[in-house]
Image: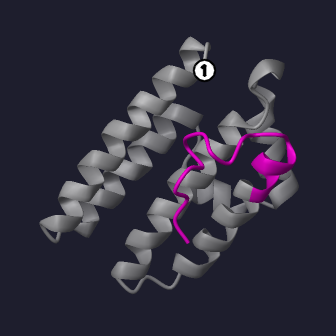
Amino acid sequence: MYRDDWLLGQLEDLAACLAAVAGFRRRGQPAEARVELEATARRALGLDPAVLVALSLPSVLDLLAADEAPHRKGARTALAARLLAEIAAILHMTGDPSAEATARRARELRDAALAAGFDPADPPLADFPG
């Protein structure tokens, strides 16, 4: 499957984040879930999730591809897509008006990762929400 220590580390971080978010959701703590997701996005991608939504899609794809090794093409984009999808779900739960734009960008990034050859059965795209 994966032989890339960077990607394995990111997937482990994502799994820990999603487990924490599930706990926050169960306890009715969407603000804490959002903080966890946004912190994970900053750590994993070096970008604030709001930037991923605010910039044009080509600009976001350029930023995500800038540090990506050729053998893991689409991995950062897939990771960004999953994190934004999870953030969008939290925004939707709280009635935040930016939920739809965030969900739309998550889908656009998922589609870009797939177009780059990222396997939809592999994390972070497996069981992609929405």
Rendered image quadrant of residue 31: bottom left
Which sits in the foreground, 100 or 111?
Answer: 111
> Which kind of residue does numbered mark 1 sit on?
Tyr
The residue that appears at 46% across and 63% down in the rendered structure is 87
Q: Is residue 80 left or right of residue 127?
A: right
Is 118 contained in the magenta span?
yes
Task: Where is residue 127? Give x, y as percent.
Answer: 52, 56
User: SS for tag 1?
Assistant: loop
Tell me the quarter of the image containing the N terminus: top right
Q: What residue is pinned by disc 1?
A: 2
Residue at the outermost left position: 27
Task: Where is residue 108? Give x, y as percent.
Answer: 75, 63
Task: Where is residue 85? Give x, y as percent.
Answer: 53, 62
Is 38 contained in the magenta span?
no
The residue that appears at 78% across and 58% down in the rendered structure is 111
Whether 72 is drawn above or below 39: the answer is above
Prevalent SS, magenta region: loop
Magenta region: which residues? 111-130
Which sits in the foreground, 118 or 37?
Answer: 118
The residue that appears at 40% across and 32% down in the rendered structure is 13
Whether 128 is drawn above or below 64: the answer is below
Q: Is residue 108 left or right of residue 7?
A: right
The residue that appears at 19% across and 56% down in the rendered structure is 23
Rendered image quadrant of residue 123: top right
Task: Where is residue 25? Give x, y as percent.
Answer: 23, 66
Tell me the quarter of the image containing the C terminus: bottom right
